Each structure stands twice: as C-alpha cells, then as structure tokens.
Image: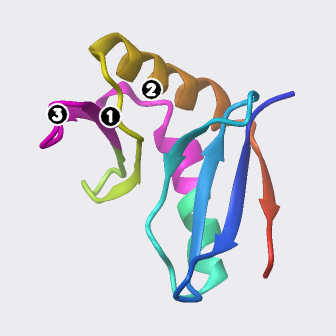
Amino acid sequence: MAGKFEIYKDKRGEFRYRLKARNGQIILTGESYKAIAGCRNGVESVKKNSQDDKRFETSRDKNNQFRFVLKAANGEIIGQSESYTSSSGCKNGIASVKKNAPEARVVELDK
C-alpha cells in the first residue's frame, strides 16, 4: 500500500494536507487554504513536483536541525518537512516523499 494524503480542517477552519508514508509517519505538510479546491490543487502540485530533484531544498533551522521544503515551478513552497537530526535522515525524508506522493490516495477528513 502506498502513502496517503489527508486533507483536513485546522483550528482556524482552513483546509490543509499532510502526506503520510505507509508506516503512518507524516513526511510532508502543506500550507492552509480557504477552500478545499485549493487544497486539492496543492496535493496535485506535490504529486507532480515531487518527482523533480530541483524542487527540493534543504536547510537547517534555528535548532540546527535539518529540514526540507518542496517548491512549485514558480518557486512557491508547497510543502515542508518535519525536523531531522541528521542530513541522512532529511535525505531519506525526501526519498520517501518522492516514492509515496505520486500514487498516494487522497482522504478527506472532517469536511
């Protein structure tokens, strides 16, 4: 079974998505959207852009942890990772997004 995207409402009532790997771990989260249609478009953008290595950027946060973002062709961030303690963990996270995103099913929670 492949991973899955979950679309849900956040505390402010806006729509968000998260990509979960087969083991249930969240590997990518998206921004908030006012409308569910925009959120669905964000998921489709992740599916497409996750297959291009140039769309991923890694960095370190203020706690010296590793993170990555996924960007669309226009440079806009469409997803971000959790923090990783090592560079190799971050690279594994990217590999997991690349593997899971294209075929991940979409589940809409609590519309």
Determine which residue is flagged by label 1: 56
Determine which residue is flagged by label 3: 60
- Answer whether residue 47 is magenta in the image: yes
- Answer whether residue 59 is magenta in the image: yes
Q: Residue at x 52, y 54 (%)?
A: 45
Query: Badge 2 local density, few (<14 within 10 Å), some, or many (20+)?
Result: many
Q: Are marks 2 and 1 in contact (CB under 8 Å)?
A: yes
Residue type, mark 3 in image: Arg
- In the picture, the quarter occupied by the N terminus is top right
**Residue nearer the viewer, 98 or 88:** 88
Q: Tell how many labels.
A: 3
Question: In the rendered view, does 51 fall on the left or right side of 61?
Answer: right
Residue type, mark 2 in image: Ile
**Residue nearer the viewer, 14 or 102:** 14
Query: Badge 3 local density, few (<14 within 10 Å), some, or many (20+)?
Result: some
Q: Which residues are magenta?
A: 44-69
